[in-house]
Amino acid sequence: MGAGVTLWPNASFVLDELGLLQDIDAIGGRPLVMHRQDATGNALGGLDIALLDRTMGYPTYTVLRRHLQEVLLDHVARARIPVEFGHRAVNIELDAHGRAVAHFENGASIRPDLLIGADGRMNSVARKFVAGDNTPVYQGFVNWIGVAQGQHALVDDISIQDFWGAGERFGCVAIRPQLVYWAAAQARPLSEATPTADIRKEVEDVFAGWPEPVAHIIRATPENAIRLIAVHDLEPLHTWSRANVLLVGDAAHAPLPTSGQGACQALEDAWHLVRCLDGASGRLDEAFRAFAKVRSPKTAKLAEQGRVFARGLFATDPETCRMRNERAKASDPVRDVAVLAAGWGEGLPMPGCTDSTPAQGEGFGSLYRIE
């Protein structure tokens, strides 16, 4: 199920609208600050998450992905919505009446009134049907992700810690002092983006000598809890639908982890889609147009920002890294919060948020995040 996810205030708004926020509060951590350092431990500023939460009117949570899934599935069961496991979609085609038929690996097929393609960024059958292609774009770096758990505290507080090197990064996110998920990243060609036989030793070697708690957290992670991911995203789509099939989540827009908004934007999709369907009085074509109109600009901007941040974060030139770090140290923390609140709250009726969005590159020094 991957490692964890930070549910920023825009995601918490949606979860509250769905009646799920109380359950998330019971399982998640509440970080109040993000600290940044370089690979030798020098401070590079940070993000005042408590101020961001107050500005946007909702809290930030850190959760394991499997725990978030458990909450969602629990509420699905309470609503008596059937879930069928063991159905891997392999193809979608149109029937004689122009309605989509989805075929599954086990031989089953369905012909629904509305088919929502939420099948991810890497092998989306729905995206291939809608767009004719679903080729992900490798962005030049790999992520090792893991979940560390100890009998004693692994970190001093519930916070996000982000360490920047030259072409390398280590981020750790506390849920509780004894439970931390993390992502370690390194720029490398796709031909070298495969795990070694001893994956934990590989991570330890890459980040040997980095400030604590980096080594401590890696050692506290079972080897079977570490995965290596070649990080891809997708080019923005011109259309998100075809016939009665609509793309949402990573199948439609797959930002890099440096955007910090992948899961958050998938949740926003759900909130907006319901309103578009209600407002279209049963006409799918009208609902699809309204949905794409409201979602496409925001998700495209976040995807591009994720790419820009990744290029700066994984630079290997020493002078470029020095200038990047100096910009981060010089950034205005209050302005950084205002930029995030405006960008993340766009299109949502949230306190402290407007319909305006920051210009490309605004807040460059502070907007590297961990998802």
Image (cartoon, rainbow, N blue to C red):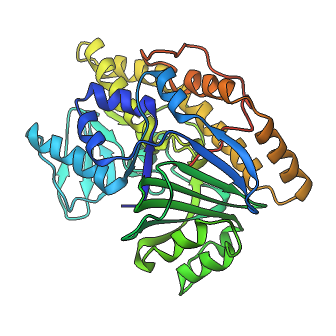
> Dividing the picture into quarters, in which one does residue 139 lie?
bottom right
Q: How many marks?
A: 0
Vertically, is 147 above or below 38? below
Q: Nearer the viewer, residue 333 or 122?
A: 333
> Dividing the picture into quarters, in which one does residue 205 lie?
bottom right
- Horizontal side of 80 relative to 219 (left or right) equals left
Q: Quadrant of the N terminus?
A: bottom left
User: Residue at point 60% right, 67% down?
Assistant: 214
Q: Nearer the viewer, residue 135 or 186?
A: 186
Q: Nearer the viewer, residue 330 or 129?
A: 330
User: Residue at point 31% right, 32% down?
Assistant: 15
User: Residue at point 47% right, 18% down?
Assistant: 347
- Horizontal side of 264 relative to 82 (left or right) equals right
> Dividing the picture into quarters, in which one does residue 66 lie?
bottom left
- Horizontal side of 100 relative to 183 (left or right) equals left
Percent position (x, y) of residue 58?
Answer: 40, 26
Vertically, is 31 above or below 173? above
Q: Would you say residue 243 is visible in this rendering?
A: no
Percent position (x, y) of residue 254?
Answer: 52, 44
Percent position (x, y) of residue 251?
Answer: 44, 45
User: Residue at point 22% right, 30% down?
Assistant: 19
Q: Would you say residue 331 is visible in this rendering?
A: yes
Percent position (x, y) of residue 259?
Answer: 58, 42
Residue extending farthest to the right is: 319
